[in-house]
């Protein structure tokens, strides 16, 4: 709604116009009336109307003086002048203040409404134009930085651009390309992250590295192109601030490649340089700052190739001996790290080791491990791939250990059951048990000791004495010789008596059943 102020020194005119005009239908609101220019000026200052309908002849400050005063401070206010026939030529002097609408008194309701409608229409059209202009300006302000970013990114990454393109964009964006020395930062976020995190890194970097020539996302990286003004130490400080700030809010680490200094027209070569640096995170690890000095030379001819004892590793995994397997894998990865061979060659070794390890798993598990390999070999560092392989190898080794242990437990159970059936036989020996279950006696002896914590012969002796104790509890008058015979000692009752006392603390004749509580 447009606000209207009505000014006339005649009360009847004020009251008549106020009550006759349907203000809301015209899209207006009558905010006040005044009977002279001074009173009107006070209302203008308090309510800031959009339209003033005023008489010319008034005491104190007349209508022309009011127009002049208001136009000086509130140039957007529109006026409708009410004037008599004799004053019309005089009223034209108000045109210099932009007054366009004049009505002869007494004016009709229709003429006044028409004048108000024209002014409202003009104001609405002007408002639409202003909104359109502001929209265009706003959109340009939004688009130009992105256009600058896009074209500069093309200049850095597109090898077909040359001197003409540099000159064109120099004129377009006002960037002094010639004779500038620059450095590039290429940043990679470690771990699974969303695309918006790249923009977070970009915004943080822009705040810390003031006024970079370019800051943009390029694929899964953030690229900063800056003037070579800060010292290397200052750059290190900025990079560390970027990393710590981002980690504080998003819990991700950043790996950063910093190029050497070069001419801005050579920015594409510097960008390629940072890509090479960033690849070496494979050896240097996640969260590194990588520069030219960190890139190790290729392995010199004559140095030993990578070798590892495959049979030793596989034997440890098959047996379930995780500590031995872990030590062998650790030795392999240390050697790969020290050799610092071509990355693709090193990855081929890693795939070979990985496949050998997972072959010891079941078909379903092996397929699951293979499905994880492409992403790991593409994105991981040597250290993270080592952790990946170690975790899988440990799963396989422990699974093998449990399988072996289960077989050993079953074998030991068979040996105990054999003793239960044959303990009365004086000829019960480890060899007899081994022959019965078709196993090597030395092997089953070791497995029995490992599983039960005691030798097989000691277990047989304890079992026979336990059975003799049970016989005494059933029949306290049983002779020692009979006990020896029934417990597997045959006729060697002196040896039976000796072992009985050694294990129970009593001779067979002294042993009594404990009293019931």
Image: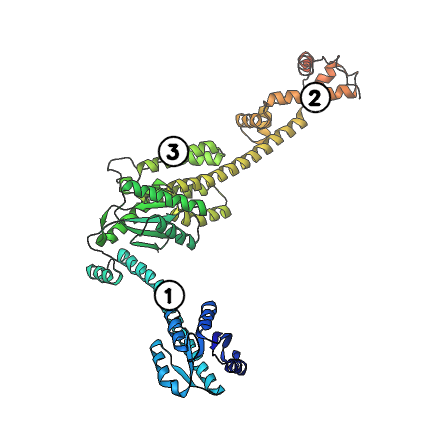
Can you tell which of label 3 and label 2 is closer to the viewer?
A: 3
Left or right: where 504 falls relative to 154: right
Residue closer to the observer: 508 or 290: 290
- What is the total number of numbered labels drawn onto the structure image? 3
Task: Find residue 493 and name its label.
Answer: none
Local crowd size for mark 3, using a 10 Å CA cut-off: few (<14), some (14–19), many (≥20): few
Residue 453 in view of the camera: yes
Q: Where is residue 461 in the image (x, y as percent from the top left)?
A: 64, 20
Instruction: Quadrant for the C terminus, please.
Output: top right
Residue closer to the observer: 257 or 133: 133
Q: Position of residue 195 (x, y in %)?
A: 42, 55
Q: Give the alpha-carbon distance from disc 1 to disc 3, as whole Å.
A: 62 Å
Establish if 433 lies above or below 276.
above
The quarter of the displayed image where residue 408 is located: top right
Can you tell which of label 2 and label 1 is closer to the viewer?
A: 1
Local crowd size for mark 1, using a 10 Å CA cut-off: few (<14), some (14–19), many (≥20): few
What secondary structure is marked by label 2? helix
What secondary structure is marked by label 1? helix
Residue closer to the observer: 291 or 88: 88
Check disc 1 and report the residue beneath it: 138
Task: Find residue 466 and name its label.
Answer: 2
Earlier in the chain: of badge 2 and badge 1, it is 1
What secondary structure is marked by label 3? helix
Check disc 3 and report the residue beneath it: 331
Residue closer to the observer: 296 or 437: 296
Establish if 261 lies above or below 92.
above
């Amino acid at each position: 709604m447009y606000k209207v102020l009505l000014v006339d020194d005649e009360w009847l005119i004020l009251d008549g116009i106020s009550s006759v005009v349907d203000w809301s239908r015209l899209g207006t609101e009558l905010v006040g009336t005044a009977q002279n220019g001074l009173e009107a000026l006070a209302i203008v200052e308090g309510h800031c109307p959009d339209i003033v309908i005023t008489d010319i002849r008034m005491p104190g400050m007349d209508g022309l003086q009011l127009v002049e005063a208001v136009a000086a401070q509130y140039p957007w206010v529109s006026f409708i002048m009410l004037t008599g026939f004799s004053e019309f030529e005089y009223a034209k002097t108000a045109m210099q203040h932009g007054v366009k609408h004049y009505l002869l008194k007494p004016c009709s309701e229709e003429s006044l409404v028409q004048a108000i409608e024209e002014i409202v229409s003009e104001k609405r059209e002007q408002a639409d134009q202003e909104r359109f202009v502001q929209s265009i300006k706003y959109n340009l302000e939004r688009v130009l930085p992105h256009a600058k970013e896009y074209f500069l990114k093309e200049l850095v990454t597109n090898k077909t651009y040359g001197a003409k393109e540099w000159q064109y964009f120099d004129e377009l964006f006002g960037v002094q390309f010639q004779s500038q020395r620059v450095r590039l930062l290429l940043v990679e976020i470690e771990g699974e992250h969303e695309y918006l995190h790249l923009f977070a890194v970009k915004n943080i970097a822009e705040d810390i590295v003031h006024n970079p020539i370019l800051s943009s996302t390029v694929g899964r990286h953030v690229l900063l192109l800056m003037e070579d003004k800060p010292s290397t130490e200052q750059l290190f400080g900025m990079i560390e601030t970027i990393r710590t700030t981002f980690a504080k809010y998003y819990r991700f680490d950043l790996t950063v490649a910093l190029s050497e200094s070069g001419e801005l027209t050579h920015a594409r070569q510097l960008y390629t340089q940072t890509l090479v640096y960033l690849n070496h995170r494979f050896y240097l690890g996640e969260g590194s700052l990588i520069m030219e000095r960190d890139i190790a030379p290729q392995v010199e001819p004559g140095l030993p190739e990578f070798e590892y004892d495959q049979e030793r590793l596989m034997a440890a995994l098959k047996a379930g001996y995780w500590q031995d397997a872990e030590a062998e894998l650790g030795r392999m990865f240390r050697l790969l790290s020290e050799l610092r061979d071509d990355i693709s060659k090193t990855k081929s070794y890693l795939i070979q080791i990985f496949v050998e390890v997972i072959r010891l798993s079941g078909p379903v598990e092996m397929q699951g491990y293979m499905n994880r390999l492409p992403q790991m070999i593409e994105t991981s560092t040597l250290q993270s791939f080592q952790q990946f392989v170690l975790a899988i190898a440990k799963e396989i080794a422990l699974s093998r250990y449990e399988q072996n242990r289960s077989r050993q437990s079953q074998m030991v159970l068979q040996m105990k059951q054999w003793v239960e059936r044959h303990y009365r036989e004086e000829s019960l020996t480890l060899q007899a048990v081994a022959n019965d279950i078709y196993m090597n006696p030395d092997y089953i002896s070791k497995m029995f000791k490992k599983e039960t914590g005691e030798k097989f012969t000691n277990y047989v002796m304890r079992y026979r004495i336990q059975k003799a104790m049970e016989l005494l509890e059933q029949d306290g008058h049983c002779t020692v010789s009979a006990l020896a015979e029934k417990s597997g000692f045959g006729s060697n009752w002196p040896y039976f008596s000796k072992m009985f006392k050694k294990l129970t603390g009593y001779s067979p004749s002294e042993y009594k059943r404990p009293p019931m509580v």
